[in-house]
Amino acid sequence: MQPGDVLLVEGNSRISGAIKYLTQSTWSHAAMYVGDTLDQENSDGVTLDLIEADLTKGVIALPLASYAEFNTRICRPVNLTREDQHTLMQFMHESLGNEYDLKNVIDLMRYLLPRPPVPISWRRRMLAFGSGDPTRAICSTLIAQAFQGIRYPILPEVERTQVKLVTGCCGYSEKEMLHIRHHSLFTPRDFDISPYFKIIKPTLETGFDYKKLNWASNESLVEGDVQPDTSI
């Protein structure tokens, strides 16, 4: 993993189940990998290389190994400059100790639920997301705010406008303008479906060679297994 990578986690707590239901996604939690940039270890001497917003503890640092038994996914921002990577790390470091924003969770649930029967385009105007306190955050909005600080896109709103062609022409061309979506509206799944984050699969990154796999021979197949069709 590289500093700036987003680790998505399929949690197993009650609130994780609610987030997965509301977002219709496998992922209920997100953390950012910071590597050894924090230069801290836990009591067992293990490097604290992840920063996340925890429901009870607020924004904390913890070892990557904490999620070794969970279903996870690595999302990597593409072509991140060294300067912007440093800015990301600085933001996450400075966020340590912030509180968890429960009001943001409640507001986000109201936004994601299909009720009240209000058009989706109007719902955002009806809600004042979060507590308004910059020292509070939830897991995905903390990371979204970090990326917005370097103007790296996650799922921006796209506005298409008509632009008149050069003088003397009577035609128009379509131009796309990106608008920043408020960081309080992001959920863990947004990093997964974002076209600007690459999905990293450790098995492939470490040099996968299918020729080296240790397959069981036909003789070792147990009764009831599907046998290969050799009639063709």
Image: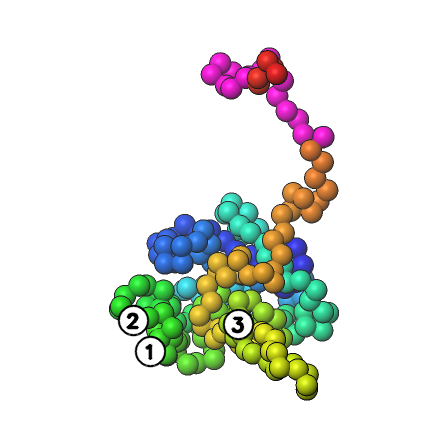
Residue behind mark 2: 118
Residue behind mark 3: 158
Residue type at the position of mark 2: Val
Q: Is residue 177 above or below residue 231?
A: below
Q: Nearer the viewer, mark 1 or mark 2?
A: 2
Instruction: Choose the circle earlier in sequence order: 1 or 3.
Output: 1
Q: Residue pushed farthest bottom?
A: 167
Contact (CB < 8 A) between labels 3 and 2?
Answer: no
Residue 107 seen in the figure: no
Q: Residue visible at 47% across and 80% down?
A: 134
User: Split into 4 quadrants, where in the image is the N terminus?
Assistant: bottom right
Q: Secondary structure at mark 2?
A: loop
Instruction: Choose the circle earlier in sequence order: 1 or 2.
Output: 2
Q: Nearer the viewer, mark 1 or mark 3?
A: 3
Residue type at the position of mark 1: Met
The picture quadrant where one finds residue 33 is bottom right
Residue behind mark 1: 126
Locate residue 189, reporting x and y percent.
48, 58
Locate residue 110, reporting x and y percent.
32, 68
- State the separation of the CA atoms marked 1 and 3: 21 Å
- State the separation of the CA atoms marked 3 and 2: 22 Å
Q: Residue visible at 70% across and 64% down?
A: 79
Contact (CB < 8 A) between labels 1 and 2?
Answer: yes
Q: Which residues are magenta?
A: 211-227
